[in-house]
Image (spheres, grey):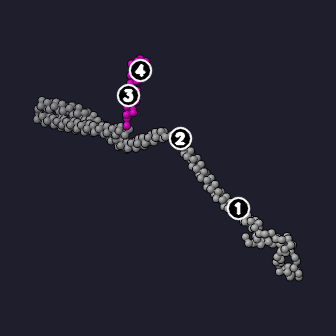
Amino acid sequence: MGLFDRVSRVVRSNLNAVVSSAEDPEKILEQTVEDMREDLVQLRQAVAQSIAAQKRVEQQYNQAQTQSSEWYRRAQLALQKGDENLAREALSRKQTFTDTANSLKSQLDQSTNQVATLKRNMTALESKIAEAKTKKEMLKARARAAKASEQINKAMGRVDTSGAIGAFERMEEKVMEMEAQSEAIAELAGDTLDSQFASLEAGSDVDSELAMLKAQLAEPPALEGTPAAPEALPASTTEAVDTPQQQTPVDAELEELRNKLDQI
């Protein structure tokens, strides 16, 4: 392959690429339909001109036929009058118009066929234009949808979905961590409050016992020989025993502790 051919191919490929990239489907469709309309207008003009030409040929043919018939009638009249030379001249004129009529008849047949062909082509073009209009709207809608889809795909391509998903996962973990931390703080706060109340309750018992011990230490100890106050016996016991028993020192001290506990 020569250098010129290679350069020519490169130039053609670049031009084709530029043209392809510059083609807008909607504009091309509109222009195509407009071109077809212009073709239809020209075709209609051609049909009209062909019909007009056909009518002119038809008129000339009819005139030639009329002249041929007229000169034939004159030839008959000349023979009837006994003028053979005049009849021969009339027949000669009649033959001329007959030949002209035959030639015009051939042209008329061709013109008729041409007009019929042009009419068929015009009808076919009208159908194609109607079909093209319908397809044009459909293709334009498809082109718009394709453009919109292309733009969406490009936008989706620019979005880093993996990074976005990773960010959402990180935020979800962070929210879960914050919730767990909040629950832990609430639990610790509840434990502290419970422990404070527990300390208060425990302190009350200790303070009570301490006060009782202080009271015990503040009272003078009872003498060993001093009889303690007799312990009240239940009614059933009093009825059963006729004579009260004397309390021991241990019983007296026990009774004293009981009284102190009752006073607290």
Of badges 1 and 4, the one in the foreground is: 1
Visible residue check, residue 76: no
Label 2 residue SS: helix
Q: Which marked residue is nearer to the observer: mark 2 or mark 1?
A: 1
Mark identifier at residue 202: 1
Residue on which disc 3 sits: 15
> Is 98 or 40 nearer to us in this picture?
40
Instruction: Kindly identify which residue carries mark 4.
Output: 6
What is the three-letter code of the residue carrying label 2? Gly
Distance, label 4 to label 3, CA atoms, is: 14 Å
Q: Which residue is drawn at 67% across and 58% down?
A: 195
Q: In the structure shown, which secondary structural element does the residue marked by tag 3 occupy?
A: helix
> Could you tell me which secondary element the residue under label 1 belongs to?
helix
Q: In front: 138, or 90?
A: 138
Q: Which range is magenta?
A: 1-24
Label 2 vs label 3, nearer the camera: 2
The quarter in which the C terminus is drawn is: bottom right
